[in-house]
Every structure is written in C-alpha cells, then in structure tokens.
C-alpha cells in the first residue's frame, strides 16, 4: 500500500481535469477503493476525492426520478420520493452491506464497486480481473458464491451489488460527464460481461464521471420489490436475489421487469424471457418457464447448483407478493 | 455465602468498552518496532529463492528475517520445548515417527509444511511501512507432491482411550432397530475479537512480554526455554484477553519469535497477527467425518453404540478432534466401540476449539439418537431417559452430581415440547414449516491447583492477585465478588490483578476449569487473612477497624486450592439439554432459529449474569456451526480460501433468537465448598444437533452435515 496524493476538487469540471492525468483514481464513498488498498491492491499515485462535488440531489425531473451520483446509499433508501415511486431500490439498498457502509457509500460508487471473489481480493492468487492474463483459480475450484450466468473461461466472479439489480429492473439510466462530452447509458448496457477482458468493468468512458441516475416513474416501478437470499440474516452478499416491477391489468401481466443478483457476473435481465409473461395471468407454470429460460445456459457446478433453486424460490416469493399488492 | 450468586455486572465492563483496558497490542513504548509476516500461498513446498533486498532498504524498515537468518534468532530447540508447545499436544497419543520430529517453528528452514507458513518477517518502525515492505519481497516456491499416508490410530488422549471396545466380548442381545450413518462437520476458525499479538521488551537481560494468551505461566515456560534463559528472567502479562476459544490456549512459536526478534534487534518488538494469520498460525478446528451406529432393543435400550471418527492433523503436530469422548460415557449401552483415525496433511496444526471433541462428536451422536428415536417411534427425550447413565460406566465411578433428567424435564416444559408432533412436517406457522428438536450436552468439570494472593492495605483497600486470565469469562468479577463476600467489604474497595506470571500460579483458562480451580484458592486466601487478623488483633469489628488496630501498612496472605486429581473417586461433569424451535420457508431455503432453551446442571451458579452470558455465547457458536461456519481449503495448494471475516461468516445479531438459559443451580456436593462446576464450554456441544433434529422434525429431511446445505433447506 503506497502513499498517495489526495485531491479534493470542488467542481465536476475540476474533478474531470484531475482525472485526465494518468495514474489517477476517483474515490466516492471509498468503501471499495480504501478496502482494496488495505488488502494490498496497488494504488494510483493520485486519488481524486469526489465528496466535495454537488451531486447530492434527489428530485423528480420530468417523467423521471433523478438521483445524484454522490447521494449516499442510506439517503436513497430512506427517501420518501424513492419509497413512493421505486420501492425496490430502497429494499435492495437496505438488504446490502451494513448501516455504516451504506452511510458512506454513494450511488455512483455502488455502481462501480469491485467484485467479492476471494481469489480476486487476496492479492497473491492469480486473477484475470486484478492482473489480466494471470489466470483464474475459480474456474477449477469455484466456491458457493460464484456465478452461474454470464461466465467466461476467464472469470466467474459474481457481481456484488444489490442496488444495481434493482436499478436494472427499474430501467435506470446512468448519466455521465467527460471533459468535453456527456452521455447516458442504460444500466442494462452499463456493465461488460467478463469475456476475455474481465478487468474491464463497465462501458463508462475512460476519464468520465457518473453524475447520477434517472429512474422512469412508471406504474410498474411503483409496484416493485426486492428479495435477497443469503446464508446469514444480515451483512452478507446475495446467494441469489431478485428485483421485480410488476403491473397487472384484469389479472394479466401488462408490464413486468425482472432482474437477478448474486447469480451472474453482471446484474442479469432477459427482456425476451420477460415477454413470455406478458398478456397472461401470473401462474406457477409461467414463472417456472420464465426461470427455466433464464437458466437454460447456466454454467452449473456442484458448488453453485443450489443457486437455481434459490433464484426460483425468490422469484415465486417476490412475484406473489407483488401480485397481491 | 451472601453476595455470591448475585448478578454483579462485570467490574471491568466500563474499562473494556471505553478503551481503557490495555491489550497486548495496545502497549506503547517509545521505541517499539512492529513485526509483520509474509505467508506462503501453498504447501508442501520448498522455498527455492527469496529476495528481500528491496524490502530491507525501504525507509523505516529495520530488518527482514527469513530462514537464512535463523542463526540470528538463536532458537533453542529440544523435544522438551516441543512438548510444551501447541504441536506437542497429542503427540504422545499419535506416537508415530512424525511425532518425534522437531515441532514447527517459523523461519527455520526452506521446507513449507502448510500454506500460510511464515517465510519472512519484516520488522519496521511502523505497521504501514512493515506492510508496504511485505509487498516488495519476491520469492519462488517449488510445490512438492503429496500423498497422505495411511491413517494413524492414536492411543489415549484427553485421559480417554481413543480406540475403545467395551463389552466387545459380550452378546449384545436381541436388536430390533439399528441406525447407521456418516456425519460431517466443517473446519472452523476461532477468530476471537482480539487478534493475537505479543509485545516483547528486554531490559537488562530480563524479558517482559505483553501477550494475548489464555495462560501466562505456560507461555513463560515455553518462551524462557526457547530463549535459553531461566524462567525467573521472563515475565508474561495478559491483563486483558479479547477472547480466545482455544486459539490462545496452547503456546505457539510466534509468541517466542517476538522475544527472539526483540533480543536480536535490541529494541522492543510488537508482533501482530493479522486476521489472515489468525486462520493458520494459532490453530483451527479440523473438519471431521464420523460414522455412528446405534443398535437398540424393542424398548429402545442401546445394545450397541459404535462411533468411528476420521480426522486430520498437520505433518508433525499431535492434536486431533477426539470426537468420541461423549460416546464413551454419556449413555448406557451393552457394547460401546469408539475409534479414531487421524490423517496427516500439509496443513497448520489444529488445536482445541471450544469444547474440542465433544462439539463435532455430539453433532454425530445426538443426531444419530434422533434418528434412532424416529426409527423406534420413541420420543427423543424418552429415548435418552431410557439410556441415561446412572453412573460413569467408562471410568467406573459415580457422578459427583448429575441432574440431567431434570434438565430434560424443565427444557421440555419451557419450549412447549408437547406441541411437537412425532410425524415431521406437521407444524406450520405463517407459511413456514416449524420443527422442534433437542439434544444432550455434557462437558468435563476439571479443577487444577491454583494460588491467589491478597494484599490488604491500611486504608481497607484490597488487591486480589493471581496469574489466572480473564478471557471474557468474568474471572475478574468473580474474584472481586468472592473476596467482597468473604471479607465483608464493598467491591469498590477491591482491585483484581490477573494474567501476570509473577503472580501466584493458576491454570491456563481453558477446558472450563478456571472457576472451580481459582475460586476455592481465593476463599482459602480470605480465610487465611481472617486467621492472620484474628491472631494479630483478635476477632470482632470490620476489616478496616481491625486493620487500623493492627497498625500495619499492609498485610499479605496467599491461599491455595489443590483442584481435582486423576485418582478421584467420582466423575465430575456438567450436563445439560438444548431444546430448539426452527422455522423454515422451504420455498426459499430460509431457516430461522426461532427459540433456544438451554437447561444446565453446572452445580452452584456463582454469578447468573456471567454464567448466562457464557452459555449464550456457546449457543451462538453452535448456531454458527449449524448454519454458516465453514472454512474451506483449496485442494491443490492446501490454502484456506476464506481466511478472513469477510468470507468466513459468523452469526450476526439478526441470526440470534431469544435464548432461554436455565440453571438448575443445585450444588455439587463433592467438587468444592461452593458446589460450583465450570461452564465455559457446555453451552456449545449438542446445539447443532438440536437444530438439525428440529430441522428434521420440520422437513422430514435429515441434515447429516453442518453447516446445513441448501439441498436440505430447499423444498423440491
């Protein structure tokens, strides 16, 4: 752990200018960056602290709910606006980490958090994500937490976020700013599958900063929820989780969005599979068919096969709850 | 005795929660160096090359030690020293050629016996520099092939025969029901809240060590010999210990290493184990595979109890889990066969972990009894009553006191056992399956010789001094209470000084023996003080009045207690019964322990508040074992994968149900004047089985391994 230069820009423009300089890393809440530094990850020589930036608003803007990138996870989870229009987001955040971590962690940082694979975190294992090309011990010796969807021969680390899974089901858009440009990426296009380059986390342009997320305020989003299954009751990453937004009309599904966490290398959603649920009553058979379709190409090992049953149980549980409300 | 049996809160609680209590790593001297170690990522292996040149010249680095520097550390090594260390425990039972090899010490040669073994130690001015320097050490390992040799069948261990056949020549009689199954328990890590640390300070040829240990005298004996100096030139202090659970019970070579480093460098050294080090350098509970066979006649009387255990130890160590201990004596059977089979692996040496042997053993035995109850159609409580051991048949002695049957009865009442349906899947609540289960717990109640010194000052204040440690059990509080009630003074007048090898000797805090060893010595000291005052100033008056009358600045007396010996005419055990209720949402595999009732027969309870806390802690350990705790090893490198508290899950508050602890509080008429037996470990054995038995009652699916897996928890 080398000592670093800490910078505290007061404007987004100044922060972006700092990030232009090579060997610079942005720090939001610090719950990933500082954690990895303590584990012995090599550090950039310059760290840009984003805590002075003015990205802390939660507001209705047009048809969307806007949440600034530096809003803390705790603030999002307790926001009346979020609870009203996107309850799944609040539920997902409150199922994650601990109160202390949620108080420090930001929305933008949560989206960018590192995976929790034990081989990744202990720096003396080979790891393609930490050190490209060094190999992946998880492929031959997976653990119960590894992914069954979106895997590659180079990485099977599970995406750790609860919040991002809810955002995926809620059709969130990530807004970003660069030195000379800005843009929007939907959460469904935000993450990269590990493929051959598992060290590349997202499609956020190099040197850009996440400025916030926009969540469409739909009827389905108002009837959304999150269910997380794990080995202990609190303070543990998901064995499997599901976020869903559901709208029924006359007992038939007219809008549905379902995203899975804890099972895949990225927050997982399948629009085509969702389409099979539309225009039908929500039934056990339909839900099972949907899940079978999601899992048809799952990369199952004896250590991870339980995730299918967990995801199925979680899905039934959550959809039944949303159908009742 | 008034004052005793009171809910006196811990006298050191405020010191602990405000940070005033000084632990081994908190000791600050002006020029103290920090030592941190680099771990081998695999084993077995040869260290082919190690380059510390860059680390050595880093500003703030004072020195770097590898096996090439072994002569500078000047270790004294002998079989006598090895016998005092952690690897020595059990070697006599193993009695194989590996047990005669020198025990493991770090930085001695290029052979890597286990993953996590230290291959270099950096000594630096600050912990940050030490950590940075570790990252600059380059090394190369040649992994060696490994094939385990045939399992060893050890002899006597923990005073019990590990290969036992009782009544093997008698006819077992007609058997109408037989159950036989394999049971597995996981490797577990102690991970007490305070990671182990040693601060070693030399002054004029004398060593003072602030060490996180459960036993200061045992530490002194090992370290002095390792340094090749007389014991009276070493003082070991452990006034506060932030939990141990066995990880600080045996003496590990790193404790001596701190002193060797400080001697070699001529400056104080603090050697700090990280969380990762704690998973390897101070022992673990090894995984077990056990086979239990129970045969019974038509009335449910055991005709045969067979318990075979397959366990592991390190390449040169001796400790293995003696899983069959309870099976030897807890129930009556016409024939009892117990065997242990130990395989050596390139792993760190395992060590006692809260109720070693009984904890994994009781999971197998008490689950098997539940299986037998189900097979015979008998209530699990009734089955145990029918096989109740009226006396200790294994040792051929009467129990000093055994009210286990009352534990069953009261536990059944408190949990509402009459709600339990013999047919699984009969109870439901809020969409969840509900099950009830129970199991027996038992643990020995030894006592060893101990001494306590009292120093009464002219102002009426009293110092209580003993080398005993308080590892979170409440020993400091119990001693203050005991002296206060015996001498008729306020607790606020008393200061208790513990964990110092210069103080009167008391045993290491382990195996549930401290209370029964140390408290009688304190009572003896109080009697001696009264006698001395009687002789000096006559009787009558308060302690302060008599002290004033004497005109002395202070009075010092010592008390002793001899403890129990192997030749006692009775067997001393504590007993208990756990009853548990679980709720399972089997659609999502979500298991919640909704209630635990633990009824214990531990003789007189000296302080219910402390005692309940001990039992609750044991129950929570058992809950962790049943639901989540499992250390896993990488099969090719033998490295522990989850050697940290991010990946090794222990229960959080939300996992812990209401725990109803009931003490029978019936004095043991034989063990000591108080009638009190130890209770540090008895809360744990049987708990995981009680939960598994409740889970079976809820689901009709039998969990024969812990932690419970999703194939049991998820309905089809």
Image: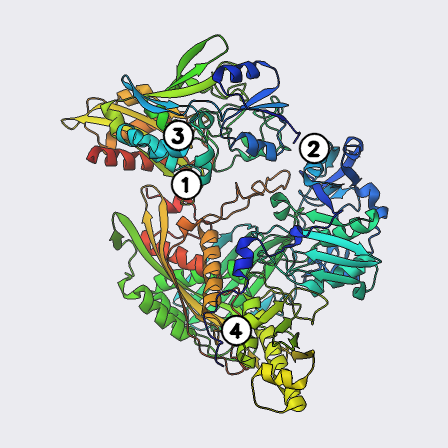
Same chain for labels 2 and 3? Say yes or no.
Answer: no
Question: Is residue A171 in view from this perspective?
Answer: yes
Which residue is the site of mark 1?
A230
Discs 1/2, front: 2
| Secondary element at tag 3 | helix
Compute the Cα span from label 2 to label 3: 34 Å
Count of marks overlaid on the render:
4
| Whole-percent x, y for residue A183 in the image | 42, 11
- For disc 3, the chain is A
Residue B383 numbered tag: none
Secondary structure of residue under mark 2 = loop
Q: Pointers 1 and 2 in contact (CB under 8 A)? A: no
* On-image quarter of the N terminus of chain A: top right
Q: Position of residue B403 (x, y in %)?
A: 43, 76
Question: Is label 4 in contact with label 2 (beta carbons under 8 Å)?
Answer: no
Say which label, 1 or 3, has the lower sequence index.
3
Asked which colour scheme the image uses, the reply is rainbow
Label 3, on which residue? A163
Q: Residues within 10 Å of mark 1 (few under 14, many from 20)?
A: some
Give the residue furthest to the right: B71
Label 2 CA crowd tier, 10 Å (few <14, some 14–19, many 20+): some
User: Is B78 or B171 nearer to us in this picture?
Assistant: B78
Q: Are marks 1 and 3 on the same chain?
A: yes
Q: Quadrant of the C terminus of chain A?
A: top left
Disc 2: host chain: B
Residues behind callouts 4 and 1 on a single chain = no
Rounded to the nearest angstrom, the CA distance separating label 4 from label 3 is 52 Å
Mark 4 or mark 3, whichever is nearer to me: 3
Q: Which residue is mark 2?
A: B135
Q: Spatial distance from mark 1 to mark 2, Cα to Cα? A: 34 Å
| Residue ID for mark 4 | B573
**Please, is residue B633 above or below residue B342 in the view?**
above
């Amino acid at each position: 752990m080398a000592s670093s230069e800490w910078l505290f820009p007061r404007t987004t423009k100044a922060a972006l200018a700092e990030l232009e300089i090579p060997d610079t890393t942005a720090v939001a809440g610090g719950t990933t960056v500082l954690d990895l530094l303590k584990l012995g990850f090599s550090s950039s020589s310059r760290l840009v602290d984003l805590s002075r930036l003015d990205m802390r608003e939660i507001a209705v803007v047009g048809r969307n709910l806007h949440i600034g990138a530096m809003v803390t996870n705790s603030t999002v989870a307790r926001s009346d606006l979020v609870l009203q229009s996107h309850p799944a987001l609040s539920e997902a955040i409150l199922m994650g980490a601990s109160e202390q971590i949620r108080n420090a962690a930001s929305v933008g940082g949560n989206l960018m958090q590192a995976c929790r694979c034990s081989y990744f975190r202990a720096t003396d294992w080979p790891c393609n994500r930490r050190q490209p090309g060094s190999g992946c011990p998880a492929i031959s010796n997976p653990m119960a937490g590894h992914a069954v969807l979106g895997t590659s021969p180079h990485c099977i680390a599970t995406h750790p976020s609860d919040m991002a899974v809810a955002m995926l089901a809620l059709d969130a858009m990530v807004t970003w700013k660069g030195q000379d440009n800005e843009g929007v990426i939907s959460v469904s296009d935000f993450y990269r599958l590990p493929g051959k380059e598992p060290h590349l986390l997202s499609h956020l342009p190099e040197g850009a900063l996440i400025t916030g997320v926009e969540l469409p305020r739909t009827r389905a989003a108002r009837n959304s929820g999150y269910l997380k299954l794990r080995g202990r009751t609190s303070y543990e990453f998901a064995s499997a989780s599901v976020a869903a937004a559901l709208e029924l009309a006359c007992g038939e599904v007219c809008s549905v969005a379902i995203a899975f966490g804890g099972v895949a290398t990225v927050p997982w959603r399948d629009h085509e599979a969702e389409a099979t649920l539309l225009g039908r009553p929500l039934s056990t058979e339909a839900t099972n068919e949907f899940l079978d379709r999601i899992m048809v190409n799952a990369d199952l090992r004896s250590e991870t096969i339980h995730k299918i049953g967990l995801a199925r149980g979680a899905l039934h549980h959550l959809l039944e709850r949303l159908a009742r409300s | 005795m008034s004052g005793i049996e009171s809910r006196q809160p811990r006298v050191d609680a405020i010191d602990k929660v405000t940070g005033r209590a000084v632990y081994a790593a908190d000791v600050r001297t002006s020029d103290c160096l920090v030592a941190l170690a680099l771990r081998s990522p695999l084993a077995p292996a040869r260290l082919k090359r190690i380059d510390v040149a860059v680390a050595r010249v880093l500003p703030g680095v004072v020195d770097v030690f590898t096996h090439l520097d072994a002569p500078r550390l000047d270790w004294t090594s002998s079989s006598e020293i090895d016998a005092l260390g952690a690897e020595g425990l059990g070697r006599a039972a193993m009695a194989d050629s590996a047990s005669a090899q020198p025990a493991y010490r770090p930085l001695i040669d290029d052979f890597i016996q286990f993953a996590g073994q230290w291959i270099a130690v950096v000594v630096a001015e600050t912990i940050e520099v030490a950590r940075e320097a570790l990252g600059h050490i380059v090394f190369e390992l040649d992994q060696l092939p490994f094939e385990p040799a045939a399992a060893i069948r050890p002899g006597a261990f923990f005073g019990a025969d590990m290969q036992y056949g009782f009544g093997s020549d008698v006819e077992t009689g007609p058997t109408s029901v037989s159950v036989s199954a394999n049971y597995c328990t996981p490797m577990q890590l102690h991970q007490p809240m305070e990671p182990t640390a040693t601060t070693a300070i030399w002054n004029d040829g004398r060593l003072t060590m602030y060490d996180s240990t459960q036993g200061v005298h045992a530490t002194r004996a090992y370290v002095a010999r390792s340094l090749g100096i007389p014991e009276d030139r070493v003082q070991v202090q452990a006034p506060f210990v932030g939990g141990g659970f066995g990880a600080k019970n045996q003496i590990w070579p790193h404790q001596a290493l701190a002193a060797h480093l400080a001697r070699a460098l001529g400056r104080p050294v603090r050697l700090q184990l990280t969380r990762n080090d704690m998973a390897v350098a101070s022992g673990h509970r090894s995984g077990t595979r056990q086979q239990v066979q129970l045969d019974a006649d038509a009335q449910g009387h055991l005709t045969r109890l067979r318990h075979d255990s397959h366990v592991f130890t390190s390449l040169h160590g001796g400790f293995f889990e003696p899983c069959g201990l309870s099976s030897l004596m807890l129930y009556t059977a016409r024939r009892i066969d117990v065997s242990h089979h130990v395989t050596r692996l390139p792993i760190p040496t395992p060590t006692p972990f809260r109720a070693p042997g009984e904890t994994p053993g009781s999971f197998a035995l008490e689950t098997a009894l539940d299986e037998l109850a189900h097979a015979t159609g008998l209530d699990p409580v009734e089955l145990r009553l029918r096989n109740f051991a009226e006396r200790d048949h294994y040792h051929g002695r009467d129990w000093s006191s055994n009210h286990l049957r009352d534990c069953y009865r009261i536990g059944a009442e408190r949990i509402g056992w009459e709600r339990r349906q013999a047919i699984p899947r009969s109870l439901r609540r809020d969409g969840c399956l509900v099950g009830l289960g129970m199991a027996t717990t038992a643990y020995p109640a030894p006592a060893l010789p101990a001494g306590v010194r009292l120093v009464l000052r002219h102002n009426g204040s009293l110092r209580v001094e003993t080398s005993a440690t308080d590892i979170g059990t409440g020993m400091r509080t119990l001693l203050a209470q005991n002296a206060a009630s015996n001498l008729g003074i306020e607790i606020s007048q008393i200061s208790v000084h513990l964990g110092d090898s210069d103080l009167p000797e008391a045993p290491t805090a382990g195996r549930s023996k401290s209370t029964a060893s140390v408290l009688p010595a304190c009572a003896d000291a109080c009697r001696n003080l009264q006698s001395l005052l009687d002789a000096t100033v006559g009787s009558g008056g308060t302690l302060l009045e008599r002290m004033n009358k004497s005109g002395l600045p202070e009075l010092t007396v010592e008390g002793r207690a001899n403890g129990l010996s192997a030749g006692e005419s009775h067997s001393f055990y504590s007993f208990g019964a756990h009853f548990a209720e679980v709720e399972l949402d089997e659609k999502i595999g979500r298991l919640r322990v909704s209630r635990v009732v633990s009824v214990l027969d531990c003789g007189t309870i000296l302080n219910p508040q402390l005692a309940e806390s001990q039992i609750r802690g044991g129950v929570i350990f058992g809950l962790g074992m049943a639901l989540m705790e499992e250390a896993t090893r990488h099969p090719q490198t033998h490295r522990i994968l989850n050697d940290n508290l991010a990946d090794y899950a222990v229960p959080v508050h939300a996992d812990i149900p209401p725990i109803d602890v009931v003490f029978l509080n019936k004095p043991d008429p034989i063990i000591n004047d108080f009638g009190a037996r130890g209770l540090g470990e008895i809360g744990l054995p049987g708990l995981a089985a009680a939960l598994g038995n409740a889970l079976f009652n809820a689901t009709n699916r039998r969990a024969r391994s812990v932690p419970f897996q999703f194939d049991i928890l998820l309905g089809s």
